[in-house]
Amino acid sequence: MLLHKSEGVAAQVDADQDRPSYLLDRMTYANMLDSEGNRGHRRAARIKMSNFLDVFRKADSLGHAPKVADFQNLLLTLLNTNDTKQQKCALECLVKSGYRRGLMAKYKKLLEGFSDDEKFKDMIPILIHGSQTRSGDADVPDEYQKDSEDKVVQKSKRKETKSVIPKLEEEDREAMLPVIIKLLQSKLL
């Protein structure tokens, strides 16, 4: 931090430190060097970033925020983090900011599944087929299929209506796959 004699300049430097891009730069620098001081900077930067994301997550719409493109790029960078809470907050903020012309709202449940540590393995078949279709019934006779379908329908009628995840459409793949790849890449970290 630069020290200046003028109070106005010092206030400006302090205000710059609360910008999310400054925090992200500071966190990146702290991750490159491993020392006690930098660990403290990492902790402080993560806490501040989480607090910022919590505030933004509570907003109704972030699409009309100033410099929304820069904000969306920052959120895309945060999708690579291995902190699941921070990742889910960044994903929710991206949806509220109207990223990809609102396309992320259509696939919100799919993306939330990829950000969840326990569900992300089950999301790959859903990405291809969607959760509405069932496979593996080709060798079963029709009368048994009807019985099993009736049982399935009776058993999970409520569950189907709550958790229908759409298949990723061909025309949406180009826009959505980079986001999905970032979410999957974070699971490797």
Image: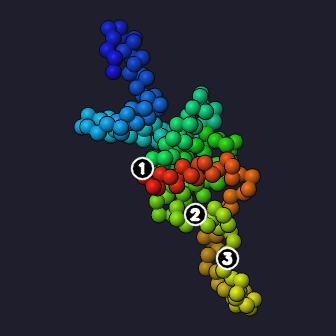
Q: Tell me the quarter of the picture where residue 143 sits.
A: bottom right
Q: Residue shown at 54%/49% (left/top)? A: 182
The x, y position of residue 184, in whole percent, is: 52, 55
Q: Residue at x 42, y 49 (%)?
A: 83
Label for residue 60? none
Residue 49 is at least partly visible in this image = yes
Q: With 147 as the anchor, is 3 left or right in this view?
A: left
Q: In the rendered image of this protein, does residue 122 appear above or below residue 51?
A: below
Which circle marks residue 123 in the picture? 2
Numbered badge on residue 135: 3
Q: CA distance from mark 1 to mark 3?
A: 34 Å
Identify which residue is drawn at 63% across, 61% down: 127
Is 171 on the left-hand or right-hand side of 128? right
Q: Amino acid at mark 2?
A: Met
Q: Amino acid at mark 1?
A: Asp
| Of callouts 1 and 2, the N-terminal one | 1
Q: Earlier in the sequence, mark 2 or mark 3?
A: 2
Count neighbours of disc 1 (C-alpha within 10 A) and say few if under 14, some if 14 to 19, many if 20 or more: some
Residue 83 circle label? 1
User: Can see residue 89?
Assistant: no
Q: Secondary structure at mark 3?
A: loop
Residue 95 at x, y percent in the picture: 60, 45
For the residues labelled 1 and 2, the Cα–Cα distance comes to: 19 Å
Extreme residue in the top direction: 6
Rendered position, 135 above or below 93: below
Q: How many marks?
A: 3
Q: Quadrant of the N terminus?
A: top left
Query: Residue at horizontal 50%, vertical 52%?
Result: 185
The amino acid type, in three-letter code, at marker 3 is: Ser
